[in-house]
Amino acid sequence: MKRAGSHIKVVVLILITTCVIVAGIMISRTKWDFHLVTYKSQDMEPIIAKNETLIVKYEVENIRRGDIVIFIYPADHSQRFIKRVVGLPGEVVSIREGRGFIDEKPLDESYLKGELNTSRRIAPDYRIPLGTYYVLGDNRDASNDSRFWGALSAELIYGKVMFK
């Protein structure tokens, strides 16, 4: 009986050692490119407060609606902005009385605060070109975003906000 028990312990030890080695190999092959960024604007409040420090991943892939991205400002390449992706390539976006629509369907924008979004600005139907995204600040009253300068080229996006 003792022999069977020690045999089981050896097998379990081998399995645990193998799992640790495999996990180490997988982690070493993964590119972890995270950076701390302090955001100096109020245009993403209340989700991101002015002067809040964020963890940004500088590898961008699979951009989806709702992602918060960091990018080079199209009108001045010395500036960096952070905005939320609301429209994807090929979609039609519009804003009516301050509310966003994609392909005529209202966006679920539960992250918005009413007191920061009192503007009833209208943006007519706009088809988002391929290779670009429509980005907006969560504090629409204070945000300089796609409503003013159009869709954002995917080439200017260089990171995603992962944590705050």
Image (cartoon, grey):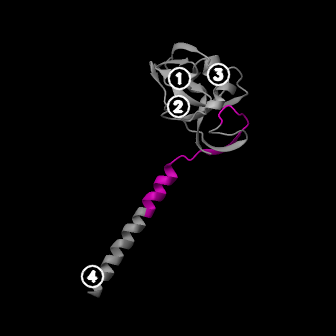
Q: Earlier in the sequence, mark 1 or mark 3?
A: 1
Q: Which residue is mark 2?
A: 109
Q: Which residue is mark 1?
A: 100
Which circle marks residue 4 in the picture? Answer: 4
Contact between marks 1 and 2 (CB within 8 A): the answer is yes
Q: Where in the figure is residue 63, as x and y percent of width and height?
A: 50, 32
* Alpha carbon distance from label 1 to label 3: 12 Å
Whether residue 138 is visible? no
Q: Residues within 10 Å of mark 1 (few under 14, many from 20)?
A: many
In front: label 1 or label 3: 3
- Residue at 50% x, 53% y is 27
Which quadrant of the rendered structure holds the C terminus?
top right
Q: Which residue is mark 3?
A: 119
Q: Left or right: 44 with respect to 17?
A: right
Q: Earlier in the sequence, mark 1 or mark 2?
A: 1
* Alpha carbon distance from label 2 to label 4: 60 Å
Q: Residues within 10 Å of mark 4 (few under 14, many from 20)?
A: few
Q: Where in the figure is residue 8, as x and y percent of width and height?
A: 31, 77
Q: Where in the figure is residue 143, as x and y percent of width and height?
A: 67, 26
Q: Give the residues in magenta.
A: 20-45
Q: Residues within 10 Å of mark 3 (few under 14, many from 20)?
A: some
Is 83 situated above or below 11? Answer: above
